[in-house]
Amino acid sequence: MDKPNKQITPSSSEYRESLALAEKVSTIIEQARTEVVRSVNSSLVHAYWAIGREIVNEIQGGDERAEYGKQVLNQLSQQLTDRFGKGYSGRNLELFRKFYLAYCQRDGIPNTVCSELPGPKPNTACSESLPEEQDTPHDPSAKDADDAALPAKPEIPPVAERPGQRFDPNLSWSHYRLLMRVENENARAFYEAEASRQAWSVRQLDRQIHSLFYERLLKSADKQGMLAETGETSDPLRPIDVIKDPYVLEFLDLPESHRLHENQLENALIETLQDFLLELGSGFAFVARQKRITLDGDHFYPDLIFYHIRLRCYAIIDLKVGKLDHRDLGQMQMYVNYFDREERSSEDNPTIGLVLCSEKNDALVRYVLGEGNEQIFASRYRFELPDEETLRRELERERTLIQEQQNG
């Protein structure tokens, strides 16, 4: 009679070693999957750029060959669909053509069949409006892209794209499909760099473009440079460089109402902290909320405390429902002074303070804070993006104020 098999029970140490091994192997598998997706994404971007180049080479010639171009796209679509299935409609081929036109400066793509394709680069404009996309070939990272048309951008001096610049391997075709709709080359390059550096998802990139992140940051942080129409600068980062006006908080889904209280706004921001950090911009790290400050028995509670990694300083944010007044600025000055004396270490730079309000008087801010202020700021918040015309008026008003200060 055969003896039953004896079940071997691993010891606790063996079990822990097994879990550790499984964790290491899982990490390897996840990294490999990530690399596969990145490689596929990069290959798709290169391929679509090259397809667009071949189409432009074939049908270049402007409006005179428009009908011929349409016939070429229809015939090519049918032939590719017969070979490869869905994803190569005439509409998508037109999208690839416009993709190349938006990035025609990017030649010499290495390590792909695209770089070996013959044909000279056409002498053509590199910016056109783009149609809606349908049934584009599969993009592994595209989970939640939205193809809604983007608003037009205010005129800001463009910066020429660097010849031979390569596509970022961290960005997918879905990212570039959004980027190529940004007509301003300077803004497009900014969004591309930030999307890669901050690992923005397609939805996050879409939100930043829709909320005119670049224009708001430029208006707030580089007024002198905007007036002089200069390009990028190598100067050290300053506090004013990270402050925007206005801040767009549409993700809170709160109504514009005088009945709204500061604590409601604060709670909503904490519940959507990831979105709020995205709106604040890169470098902000959350530290605390309602941190108690005690001065001779009196207690004060600044709403939100952050630390800015690149500026190496604390950043205090206070929320104001309604119009800003001098008392709000005075209170923020007290918070900043306290943190500079009690919380700031020898390695930290001076604390900065930001009062977020629904309405402000720029003249009051200047007179209360003084001309040499570099630590206290006041910005408006909006629960929806201002329309293009409103933003243009604000840009022009900022230019006028700066010119008056320079002349007076």
Image (cartoon, rainbow, N blue to C red):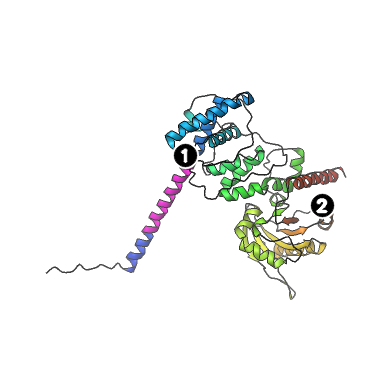
The prevailing secondary structure element of the residues shown in magenta is helix
Q: Is residue 173 above or below residue 271?
A: above
Mark 1: which secondary structure? Answer: loop
Amino acid under disc 2: Glu
Label ID, residue 86: 1
Quadrant of image for the N terminus? bottom left
The answer to which of 25 and 98 lies nearer the viewer is 98
Residue 308 located within the stretch drawn in magenta = no
The answer to which of 113 and 101 lies nearer the viewer is 101
- In this view of the protein, can residue 326 be seen by the observer? yes
Mark 2: which secondary structure? Answer: loop
Q: Which residues are magenta?
A: 21-42
Amino acid under disc 1: Lys
Give the mark, 2 or 1, whose residue is nearer the N terminus: 1
Give the residue drawn at x 68%, y 51%: 242
Q: What residue did someone put label 2 on?
A: 371
Give the residue drawn at x 79%, y 44%: 396
Residue 218 image offset from top left, x and y in percent: 71, 45
Q: Quadrant of residue 5?
A: bottom left
Q: Quadrant of residue 326?
A: bottom right
